[in-house]
Amino acid sequence: MCDTFSAGGYTDWYLPAIWELNECYNAAKIVNTILGATNGFQYFYYWISTEYTSSASNSACGQGFDWGYAGNPTKASTSYRVRAVRKF
């Protein structure tokens, strides 16, 4: 989804790694002040590209924007949001 995303004239968007989305979490208050409640970060979980290493190959990582912690839910049974980012 992020690989094919296009916005603002840019096509180099990607799914962020855990440290990148954590930086977004740290800046969420500022981002939300600028973008507003609709376009800013909401208090949901977002998928990240960092893989969760376990015996279960159907687990992934997500970053919560409520308390800021990361989790490792099952891919098939969890609906998280996606937030594409790009390098600057």
Image: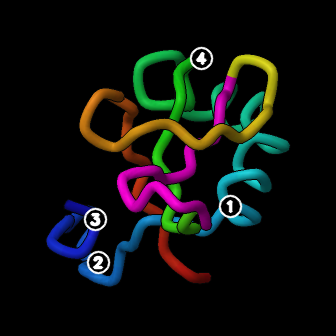
Q: Which residue is mark 4?
A: 43
Labels 2, 4: front one: 4
Q: Residues within 10 Å of mark 3 (few under 14, many from 20)?
A: some
Q: Residue at x 29, y 77 (%)?
A: 10
* Snapshot quadrant of residue 53: bottom right
Q: Which residue is mark 3?
A: 2
Q: CA distance from mark 2 to mark 3?
A: 12 Å
* Snapshot quadrant of residue 23: bottom right
Q: CA distance from mark 1 to mark 4?
A: 17 Å
Question: Residue 6 in the image: x percent, y percent?
Answer: 19, 67
Labels 1, 4: front one: 1
Labels 1, 3: front one: 1
Residues at discs 1 and 3 in contact (Cβ within 8 Å): no
Sequence-wise, the earlier of marks 1 and 4 is 1
Residues at discs 2 and 4 in contact (Cβ within 8 Å): no
For the stretch drawn in magenta, what is the main secondary structure? loop
Sequence-wise, the earlier of marks 2 and 4 is 2
- In the structure shown, which secondary structural element does the residue marked by tag 1 occupy? helix
Q: Residue at x 40, y 61 (%)?
A: 57
Q: Quadrant of the N terminus?
A: bottom left
Sequence-wise, the earlier of marks 1 and 3 is 3
Q: Which residue is mark 2?
A: 10
Q: Amino acid under label 4?
A: Tyr
Residue 15, above or below 80: below
Question: Residue 58 in the image: x percent, y percent?
Answer: 36, 53
Residue 18, labelled with which disc? 1
Q: Amino acid under label 1?
A: Ile
Residue segment shown in magenta:
53-65
